[in-house]
Amino acid sequence: MNHLDLDDSVPEWVIEYPQLLSLFQELGIDYCCGGKSLQFACREQNLNPKIVLALIEDLTTTTNHP
């Protein structure tokens, strides 16, 4: 399992953790185009990146990784 952080692109997150797709859709984070970093995508949606990272951590530790 790779360790991703806020500087990694949103598509990288989705490739590594497909279960995040629904979270990104719910939050309005663009996950398919541009390869923006997760931090930048969060700021575009006026989301606190640390809170989004905590949500991601909850999802990726409670579901099986492919």
Image (spheres, helix red, strand yellow):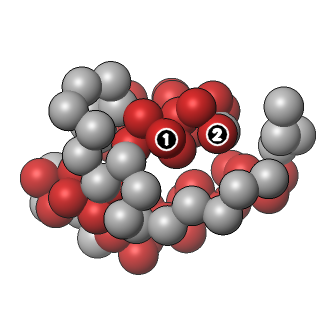
- Residue pictured at 20% horizontal, 33% vertical: 34
Q: Is mark 2 on a helix, strand or loop?
A: helix
* Residue at the disc numbered 2: 16
* 64 relative position to 56: left or right: right
Q: What residue type is labelled 1?
A: Glu
Q: Is mark 1 on a helix, strand or loop?
A: helix
Residue that lies at the very extreme toward the bottom in this rendered image: 50
Q: Where is residue 50 in the image (x, y as percent from the top left)?
A: 41, 75
Determine which quarter of the picture holds residue 38.
bottom left
Which quarter of the rendering shows the C terminus? top right
Q: How many labels does the image show?
A: 2
Q: Can residue 59 be seen in this view?
A: yes
* 25 relative position to 48: left or right: right
Q: Can residue 23 be seen in this view?
A: no
* 27 relative position to 53: left or right: left
Q: How far apart are marks 1 and 2 (CA)?
A: 6 Å
- Residue pictured at 33% horizontal, 24% vertical: 32
- Residue pictured at 58% horizontal, 32% vertical: 15
Q: Which amino acid does label 2 sit on?
A: Glu
